[in-house]
Image: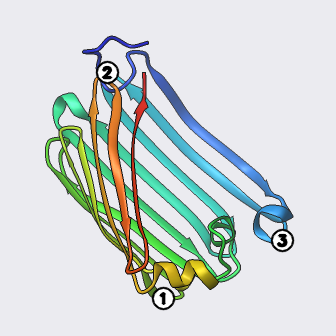
Amino acid sequence: PGAKDAAILPGFDIHIGQLKIAKLNIAEGIAGKARTGALSGKADIRDGRALVDLAIDAKEGDQLALTLDSEPDRNKFDLEAKLSAPAGGVFGAILGTDRPIAATITGDGSWKAWKGQLSADVSAAPAARLSLSADEGHFLANGTLSLQQITKGKLQRLTAPVVRVRGDARLNDRVLDGGLSLISDAIRVEGKGALDLA
């Protein structure tokens, strides 16, 4: 276990100069049909700074890219992510739909004051619109989910027309503690808990 006042990032170095999987076999059971893709990335976590780049190309238009640059002690936080999945794609199948999906996470600021947006569309219709913020280890998410495109039957009726989302979590002494609220016209779900990262 880490010390109570230990840094958020690990005290040991993690360095992946280059990760490359030129042939990533995706089995039929995952995405409806067998697919061969590729993965590349790199990571450098040392001296209290995390630099991570990850790109997955599952071919036929399925792509995921993630970039993270975080250095809490020097007030730096930058996160960008982009997902693109065509109809019948791998990422859509993982999420339980054969519809096309486009999603992005963008933001600007620092570890002490970062504000961002999560935007996701399914079949070109809004599926998620969330405002994100981070303030010295205090994380908030507020917005709506429109799930009609990816749900059916009772679940679709329970979540119509939108689900209002509020998430609130704090990271103290390597423990992420918070709650999540999901509210529609028909249901209200509240959850609280903690994740010990030490």
- Please name which of the two marks, 2 or 1, marks the residue nearer to the observer: 1
Local packing at callout 2 (Cα closer than 10 Å; few below 14, some 14-19, many 20+) is some
Residue appearing at x 75%, y 53% in the figure:
24
Q: Outermost residue, left direction?
A: 113
User: For numbered disc 2, what is the local secondary structure?
Assistant: loop
Q: Mark 3 points at which residue?
A: 33
| As drawn, 54 above or below 153 | above
In depth, the one of 134 and 37 nearer the eye is 134
Residue 107: x and y, percent? Answer: 26, 60
Find the distance from the CA under tag 3 to the CA under tag 2: 44 Å
Q: Label 2, label 1: how many angstroms apart (C-alpha)? A: 42 Å
Task: Read off the residue under disc 2.
Answer: 47
Q: Which of marks 3 and 1 is nearer the N terminus?
A: 3
Instruction: Indicate the amino acid at tag 3.
Output: Lys
Q: Residue 5 is drawn in which quadrant?
A: top left
Counting residues from the N terminus, which is met first, the one under dot 3 or under dot 2? 3
What residue lies at 67% left-to-right and 64% top-to-bottom?
94
Q: Can residue 36 be seen in this view?
A: yes
* Mark 2 or 1, nearer chain start: 2
State how the image is colored.
rainbow
Instruction: Give the residue drawn at x 51%, y 67%.
Output: 83
Q: Which residue is drawn at 41% across and 28% down?
A: 45
Q: Mark 1 points at which residue?
A: 124
Quadrant where the image shows the C terminus = top left
